[in-house]
Amino acid sequence: MKAFFATARLCVRNSGEFGLMNTLGEYLLKLIALATQWMVWRAILPEGASVDGMTRGNMLLYVTVSSALAPLLDVRTPASSWLHDGTMLGLFQRPRGVYGQLAAHTVGGWLVPLGLYGAPLLLVAALLGRLPAPASGWFVPSLLLCVSQGFAVDYLFACLQISIRNVDWAMHVLRGALTALLTGGLIPFAALPWGIGRWLELSPLGTLAGAPLALLAGVGQPARLLTAQLFWNLTLWPMALWAFRACRERMVSYGG
Amino acid sequence: MGRIRQIFRLYAASAKLDWLLLSRDVRTGLIYIFSDWISAVSSVLGIALLAVRFEGIGQLNADEILWMLGFFTLADGFTTMMLGSCNWLWISRVVGRGQVDHMLIQPVPLWMQILTGGFLPFTGSSCFVTGVALTAVATARLSIAVTPGWLLLLALYTLCRMAVATGCSYLAGTAAFYRPAACEELSTVVLDAMNAAGKYPLAALPVWMQALFLTALPVGLLAYLPSLLMLGKLDAPAAYVWPVAMAAALLSASGMLFRKGLKHYARHGCPRYKSMGFRN
């Protein structure tokens, strides 16, 4: 574990590689996007109204926590970009497991966004009395399962990238598009029409952000969602390990 | 006349390069096209579904929201199709990576390279085509009378949207002349944030925020205001000119700052590449 935390610490120090201006600008724009979402939900859901049991307060809690904890709800290891720039091959030359190194870099990379954006955002919103209390303590185990499943999903996307010959930009675009809608991170499943949210919330992507946030907002059934998360963890991890082993001989990297 | 001919020749050269990219590796080209198409559809699908569920947002009903999202996709796709290649739209990458040198040695003026070098008619048009289809469907559902004047206005606002996005990207990207490594991705950050907020109908926002989004942070000019005007939901004649005025102002300001940045670049350069070609 010492090596894991040492790598994570290195990654924290590295995470501002584009500088303070870029980092603060990014967080400012995230805040503006969140404020826009807040206003839209306030207009759609008048005070006292609810959608599938979700009140306006719960909706605002949902979108705020989704923005604050975004790195945990949609886990992105550096695997995809490192496949492209050649860093990935270097991981095999170090006396540590590849998964462990990727995980350490990812966890290290969470600290700056959580410390500079996520935690202050939640703190200020709570102090201003804008957010209701979480509806269920099941949010915490669900979040842990979400993070674990997120790593497996990320490794599977990395394998897909290897199998389509490192077309990393296309994969980045495709993944961004799929996860924005299908994980429930942007729009709660409870707000979707025709009951499609009931199906999406059990899907392998829907159990990522959608499950913990639904439990937080009090619109999810803990047994149903946690079982689904457990099932996908038990299914996707073996698939990810197998696929990564099968793909490693096909890694191509140009570097530079 | 010679300049115009040269511009068309350069467009043809960019189109040929894009065709070669697609025809020499069809599989990869199709992957790009498919991923762009999925991205275009899913980026607007969430708001479209919300509009269906709540029978509209703000003063726009579900079909009008669909039209707005169609226009957003069309104009965004047009911008990417015209400026998407070689990072011309994300200029901070070009500047921050020290690649302005590559532009300066070309026997073509910089503005002409920027205007024509990003043209991607084959691999970069899927978002535009999706937007045209969405807008056509919404136009039919709303029974809008399509006249030549209406189509001209649509084309004008599409160009304005391209100018607004490009102006904001270049305004932010100019910072990369002074801080190349720190600001390399600034244009990306600005454009991503604008695209994320630009799809929402601003009628849901308080008046001060609407004013902010139509002036200092012009995300409302990407789709919302042009859609209100095209759908006849706004009765103020002055509003028709606002997108054009803002687009012109942003382009002028970014052009001025970019030229200033170039002067700084001429003195200091951008030493980011090591001799073996790696970037530090």
Image: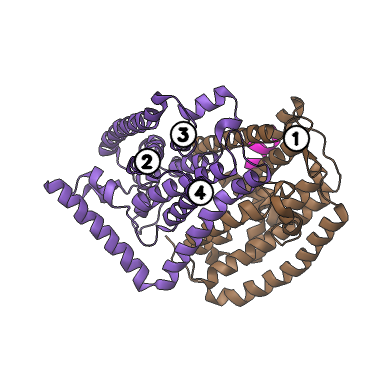
Chain colours: A brown, B purple
Residue behind mark 1: A56
Q: Main secondary structure of the magenta part?
A: helix
Label annotation for residue B138: 4
Q: Earlier in the sequence, mark 4 or mark 2?
A: 4
Q: Nearer the viewer, residue B127 or A123?
A: B127
- Tag 2, which secondary structure? helix
Residue B153 lies left or right of residue A165; in this view the side is: left
Q: Tags 4 and 2 in contact by the CB under 8 Å rule?
A: no
Q: In this view, does A114 lie above or below A81?
A: above
Q: Which quadrant does the C terminus of chain A fall into?
A: bottom left
- Tag 3, which secondary structure? loop
In space, the residues marked 3 and 1 are separated at their CA atoms by 32 Å
Amino acid type at circle 1 is Arg
In space, the residues marked 4 and 3 are separated at their CA atoms by 14 Å
Residue behind mark 3: B232
Q: Which quadrant does the N terminus of chain A fall into?
A: bottom right
Residue B83 lies left or right of residue A92; in this view the side is: left
Q: Which of marks 3 and 2 is nearer the N terminus?
A: 2
Q: Which residue lies furthest to the left in this view?
A: B2
Label annotation for residue B150: 2
Measured from the top left, where is residue A168 in percent x and y? 50, 62
Magenta stretch in the rendered image:
A112-120
In space, the residues marked 1 and 4 are separated at their CA atoms by 30 Å
Chain ID, mark 3:
B
Amino acid type at circle 4 is Ala
- Looking at the image, which residue is at 51% across and 54% down? B40
- Tag 4, which secondary structure? helix
Magenta highlight on residue A229:
no
Amino acid type at circle 2 is Trp
User: Pointer 4: residues within 10 angstroms few (<14), some, or many (20+)?
Assistant: many
Query: Looking at the image, can residue B9 be seen?
Result: yes
